[in-house]
Image (cartoon, rainbow, N blue to C red):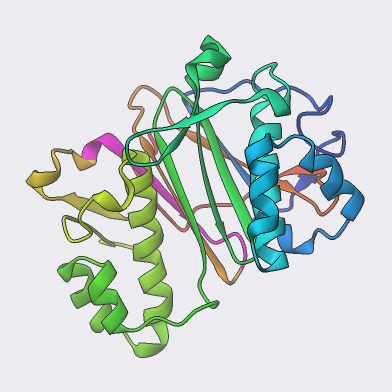
Amino acid sequence: MTTDTESSPIQVTPFPGIGAPSLSASSNRIDLWLLRYDRIDDEALLTRLRQWLNPAERAQEPRFYFADDRKRYLLTRALVRATLSRYVPVAPAQWRFGTNAYGRPHIEATQGQAGAELRFNLSHTYGLIALAVTREREIGIDVEHVSHREVSLDIAHHFLAPEEVAALAQMPVAQQQDRFFEYWTFKEAYMKARGMGLSLPLDHFSFDYPQCGTVRLSVRPELDDDAALWSLWQYRPQPHYLLALCAQRDTSTPTQVCVRELSTTLQERTVALLPTRRLHDN
């Protein structure tokens, strides 16, 4: 991952959840886990990880036609299970998940009080999986490969608010691709943090950039929400990726985002990755 300062390795076992140091989840810290799944080709490792999936997940994996999709599915499920086990003494295979009315996954209350307090959200795109974990505050994450597919103003009309489309149209054509995904990753992260996904009308909330390094959220009254209740961050973990986080705002103390990268052998290290844009991080 490209970082703003030099990163330092942490001594851990080959995968979080197997004897690795435990982590304490905190409401004023968000742990952001990153995995370049496309670089993992150790079949023995994948076989071990598959044992953590439940029967329904193991049955689903081979139904994907493309090998990349099968590997991504396996690693996303294993990553969630093993990572949550860093925070709560539950074996990776023992986690139980449910979904809300809009399909958003959550930890079942039967996992105990400590597990019920955890909040997580997952996103993946071509080559990269991103997982955000925190405590007792809703969170949403989206990551996109900005070069994997081309977008146009016609596409933007379907996914962005009118004011976002207007601002996009005023930009040089060479910059429109990146700007579209800056808007879209923020929109996805906000929708996921709300727990309502695409049931939220895409033209009822918008983002703009009043100055370098900042972002502003505007919400129409019909959504019954207050933009001041949310914190936002955007990162570029590598040149062709954009990632956005949205979390319920904690006004009592600044929020720390701790970025944790997993290698191809699933060794962990923390990296110093500065946000390119932010809003209300305290």
Image coordinates for residue 66, horizontal then vertical, percent? 67, 69
Image coordinates for residue 234, horizontal then vertical, percent? 45, 55
**Quadrant of the frame with the N terminus:** bottom right
Is residue 50 left or right of 127 when viewed as pictured?
right
The residue nearer to you, when weighing 208 against 137, is 137
The residue nearer to you, when weighing 124 against 245, is 124
Q: Residue at x 16, y 69 (%)?
A: 163
Is residue 206 left or right of 4 when viewed as pictured?
left
The residue furthest top is 113
Q: Is residue 230 magenta?
A: yes
The residue furthest bottom is 173
Q: Residue at x 63, y 49 (%)?
A: 60
Residue 9 visible: no
Q: Residue at x 81, y 58 (%)?
A: 40
Image coordinates for residue 266, horizontal then vertical, percent? 81, 46
Residue 224 visible: yes
Residue 41 drawn above or below residue 249: below
**Quadrant of the frame with the C terminus:** top left
Q: Residue at x 54, y 78 (%)?
A: 147
| Picture quadrant of residue 260 | top right
Image coordinates for residue 89, horizontal then vertical, percent? 70, 16
Q: Is residue 163 magenta?
A: no
> How many numbered discs, if any?
0
> Magenta residues?
228-238
